[in-house]
Amino acid sequence: MTDFNDLVDGYQRFRSSDWRRQRDRWAKLKEGQSPKVMVIACSDSRVDPAQIFDTLPGEIFVVRNVANLVPPFETGGGHHGVSAALEFAVTQLEVTDVVVMGHGACGGCKAALTQGFAHAPQGEGGFVSDWVSLLDGAREKVIAKHGDGPDAMREMELESVRTSIANLRTFPFVTSREDAGKLTLRGAYFAIADGVLHLMGENGEFKPAAPALAAA
C-alpha cells in the first residue's frame, strides 16, 4: 500500500523524469493555465480523470468530490467549493466543455441509495449524508423502478451524472453560455469493472465511447 513516504519517492521519480521530459510545457504553464475542459469527477481513488483521459499537465481543470455532485445554484452564506470552481472555470478560464463523470462501484452513490450515513455516530459530522441528499429525488425514482439491487446501484450512478448536469443548468452563467453555443455540458461514466467509458447522449442514455481506430 502507498504511504506518504511512497509519495515522496514518487515525487523524486517525477523530478527526474516527467519534469525534465516536459520542461517546455512546465515553462509555459508557470505563466498561467488555459484548459478548454472542466471535469467534475468523484474523489474515489480509482478514477483519476487525468489518467482515464490520458491528459497532459494543464489540459483539464478538475474538481473531485463525493459522487461527482454539483449542487444547484444558490446565493447567500456558506462555502460553495464546487460552485466557486465552476464559476472560475466558466467565467475566467472560459472552458468550452464541462464534463460530469460518474463511475462504477461509487461509494457516494451507494450511501445515497441505502442512506447508510443517515445515522452517523455523534461527532462524525453527518457530512456525507447531507451531501448525498442532493440525490434524494434520484433515489426515489431509482427505487421505484429498480428496487435496491445491483441494477439500482448502476442506475443511481448514472443518475448522479444526470442530476449534476441538471443542477449545472441552474447557474445563470452556465445557461447563458450554453444558449450562446459557447459551452457544452457532457455526461460520462467510467465502468471500473471493465475499464469502458460510456458517454451520455442528448436523451440521457449512456453508450460506450467509440473505440479508437487501429493505426494503418
Image: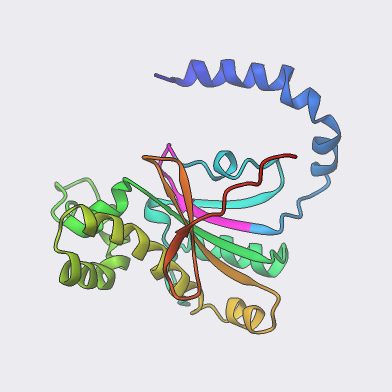
State which region is magenta.
38-46
Residue 156 location, quadrant: bottom left
- Residue in front for this viewpoint, 159 or 118: 159
Looking at the figure, which quarter contains the C terminus? top right
Query: Residue shown at 65%/17% (left/top)?
Result: 13
Query: Residue shown at 14%/63% (left/top)?
Result: 147
- Percent x, y of residue 33: 76, 51
Task: Give the image's coloring scheme.
Answer: rainbow
Query: Quick check: can you spot residue 76?
Result: no
- Residue in front for this viewpoint, 94 or 147: 147
Query: Quick check: can you spot residue 109?
Result: yes
Residue 62 lies in the magenta stretch:
no
**Is 36 above or below relative to 191?**
below
Query: Residue shown at 69%/83% (left/top)?
Result: 180
Query: Residue shown at 37%/54% (left/top)?
Result: 67
- Relative to 7, 69 lies left or right: left
**Is 175 above or below relative to 63?**
below
- Residue in front for this viewpoint, 84 or 21: 21
- Percent x, y of residue 196: 46, 46
Residue 30 location, quadrant: top right
The residue most toward the front is 216
**Is 89 above or below relative to 108?**
below
- Relative to 169, 184 lies left or right: right
- Percent x, y of residue 104: 35, 48
**Is 160 above or below relative to 193?**
below
Residue 172 location, quadrant: bottom right
Looking at the figure, which quarter contains the N terminus? top left
Number of numbered markers: 0
- Percent x, y of residue 194: 40, 40
